């Protein structure tokens, strides 16, 4: 069974491949109802974990800590990232693999898919266009760990452009498309050129902290402000009551249309007998506009740098884009009709399923949306410079193609190589990283052959290599079709090497985490 999986910040949407059709998968929600999405939720209570719909219902129970928007945590995550939950620290990777594992069980045992026993689940994954390579690796690795066969990874706006191209295939296809994708927790914009069935992703920009969740929060804040001075109920809201309030605000937000004037928010769950409050649509839109303006500014930045401000179609998708002020603000800024996806919340998943089913019918030229590089010492260690190994806009190889490689060779001056990797959205005039910067983990490599057998080097003093034969060091970096990056560092003089799949959660780290959990229990 082939699937397209849109791993969203608030919802996971899955589309199946069924003889040229791409229906959404519906899940048993655990309360006698079904839904065409699966919650991206994790609930923790001491050593117990719940995921998906079980975590959803845990929000109504006391004692559970529910982690919403798990995907947002990946933006700054590394292989050793932990999440503080009460007095315990939980490895983020463990939560991620727990969620993907629960999703697989839900697909096989609690969905409308009719799978044969042992039938493999072959998937194409969607990731934010602005996702760094570490985030891409952790996402792919967690799905593989859960037993999925990952066929490929696409940027979410690119997948949406495939859905558009497939739906409009019998019509004249525009040459240049600005895909505006405002989801539940993230925003992406991509400039895509279409040449027949070939989609060229010119460039992408994104914001990892703006989405539909934030609009729910704004509406909840407005509702609470209406009772300030009349009740203290809102000052000590329980987790269950807060969940009900956010759900109330989400439902009222999603029911808005361009003619809506007032929003009635029920507050019964905060305090029995508390009357509903009235928020005007104008108040809500005024509070939401700054966030919408941020997404438009990111789109303008994309167009000014890569598109000369020109495009043929403005294609809007993502659940967060259904808010009426979004289309209104886009029309005000760009002065043109907004083409909205007929499947706003599921266009990405459908596009991913189409690509899984017809990989040759819609060819994609994906590109890196950030610079990836390493800090290096210069001027005898008196200055640090940024070496951009893979540049922003680098074409990512298609599935099945060999990875892109880059090489560095030199003779070291110290006994240990200390490599500190990072990604950034922009670079200043002097070449230094700027904009959105993601710091990666550090790795150490033994330049001195006498340290070759050392398992750890982070505690070994760094000293100059004196009176020794010069060592021939090679760094070889690869970027594969998912955008994940690996490094192989070799001492060619002494004939040894180490490979570092950057972003991998190592066995050693897992063991340390296991020891910590055992001690806490």
Image (spheres, rainbow, N blue to C red):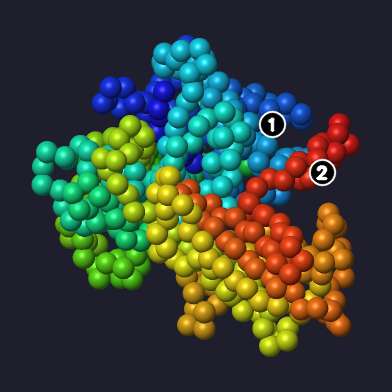
- Res. 255 in view: no
Name the image quarter holding the C terminus. top right
Q: How many marks?
A: 2
Report the front residue among 212 and 387: 387
In the figure, residue 297 lies in which quadrant?
Answer: bottom left
Please give the name of the residue rendered at 30% of the width and 27% of the height, measured from the top-left corner: 22
Residue 187 x %, y %: 41, 51
Marks 1 and 2 sit apart, C-alpha to C-alpha, by 20 Å
Q: Are marks 1 and 2 in contact (CB under 8 Å)?
A: no
Residue 425 x %, y %: 48, 66
Q: Which residue carries the number 2 mark?
A: 512
Residue 36 x %, y %: 40, 25
Name the image quarter holding the N terminus. top left
Please give the name of the residue rendered at 27% of the width and 25% of the height, measured from the top-left corner: 21
Q: Which residue carries the number 1 mark?
A: 44
In-image side of 203 versus 172 (left or right) = right
Within-10-Å neighbours for mark 1: few <14, some 14–19, many 20+: many
Report the front residue among 493 and 510: 493
In-image side of 489 versus 137 (left or right) = right
In the figure, residue 311 lies in which quadrant?
Answer: bottom left
Nearest to the eye among marks 1 and 2: give it. 2
Pick whichever of labels 1 and 2 is earlier in the sequence.
1
Please give the name of the residue rendered at 29% of the width and 41% of the height, measured from the top-left corner: 360
Report the front residue among 72 and 253: 72
In the figure, residue 356 lies in which quadrant?
Answer: top left
Please give the name of the residue rendered at 53% of the width and 71% of the height, measured from the top-left corner: 388
């Amino acid at each position: 069974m082939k699937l397209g999986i849109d791993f969203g910040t608030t919802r996971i949407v899955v589309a199946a491949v069924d003889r040229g059709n791409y229906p959404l998968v519906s899940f048993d929600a655990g309360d006698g109802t079904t839904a065409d999405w699966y919650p991206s939720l994790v609930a923790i209570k001491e050593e117990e974990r719940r995921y998906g719909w079980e975590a959803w219902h845990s929000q109504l129970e006391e004692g559970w800590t529910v982690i919403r928007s798990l995907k947002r945590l990946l933006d700054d995550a590394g292989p050793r990232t932990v999440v503080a939950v009460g007095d315990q620290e939980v490895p983020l990777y463990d939560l991620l693999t727990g969620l993907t594992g629960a999703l697989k069980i839900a697909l096989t045992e609690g969905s409308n898919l009719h799978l044969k026993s042992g039938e493999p689940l072959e998937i194409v994954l969607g990731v934010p266009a602005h996702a760094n390579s570490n985030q891409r690796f952790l996402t792919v690795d967690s799905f593989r760990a859960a037993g999925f066969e990952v066929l490929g990874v696409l940027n979410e706006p690119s997948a949406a452009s495939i859905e558009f191209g497939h739906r409009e295939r019998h019509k004249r296809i525009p040459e240049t498309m600005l895909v505006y994708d405002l989801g539940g927790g993230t925003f992406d914009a991509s400039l895509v050129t279409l040449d027949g069935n070939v989609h060229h992703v010119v460039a992408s920009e994104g914001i990892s902290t703006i989405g539909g969740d934030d609009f729910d929060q704004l509406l909840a804040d407005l509702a609470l402000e209406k009772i300030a001075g009349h009740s203290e109920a809102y000052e000590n809201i329980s987790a269950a009551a807060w969940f009900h309030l956010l759900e109330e605000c989400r439902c009222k937000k999603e029911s808005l249309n361009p003619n809506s004037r007032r929003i009635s928010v029920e507050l019964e769950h905060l305090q029995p007998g508390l009357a509903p409050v009235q928020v005007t649509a104008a108040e809500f839109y005024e509070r939401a506009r700054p966030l919408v303006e941020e997404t438009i500014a990111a789109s303008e930045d994309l167009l000014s740098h890569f598109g000369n401000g020109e495009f043929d179609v403005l294609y809007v998708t993502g659940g967060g884009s259904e808010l009426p002020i979004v289309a209104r603000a886009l029309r005000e800024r760009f002065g043109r009709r907004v083409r909205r996806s007929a499947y706003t919340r599921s266009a990405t998943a459908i596009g991913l399923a189409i690509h899984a089913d017809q990989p040759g019918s819609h060819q994609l030229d994906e590109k890196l949306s950030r610079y990836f590089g390493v800090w290096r010492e210069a001027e005898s260690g008196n200055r640090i410079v940024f070496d951009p190994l893979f540049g922003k806009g680098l074409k990512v190889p298609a599935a099945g193609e060999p990875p892109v490689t880059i090489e560095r060779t030199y003779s070291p001056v110290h006994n240990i190589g200390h490599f500190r990797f990072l990604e950034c959205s922009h670079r200043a005039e002097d070449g230094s990283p700027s904009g959105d910067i993601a710091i990666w983990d550090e790795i150490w490599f033994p330049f001195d052959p006498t340290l070759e057998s050392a398992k750890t080097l982070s505690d070994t003093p760094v000293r100059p290599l004196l009176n020794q034969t010069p060592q021939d060091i090679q760094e070889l970096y690869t970027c594969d079709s998912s955008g994940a990056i690996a490094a192989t560092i070799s001492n060619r003089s002494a004939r040894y090497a180490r490979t570092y799949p950057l972003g991998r959660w190592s066995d050693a780290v897992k063991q340390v985490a296991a020891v910590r959990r055992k001690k806490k229990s």
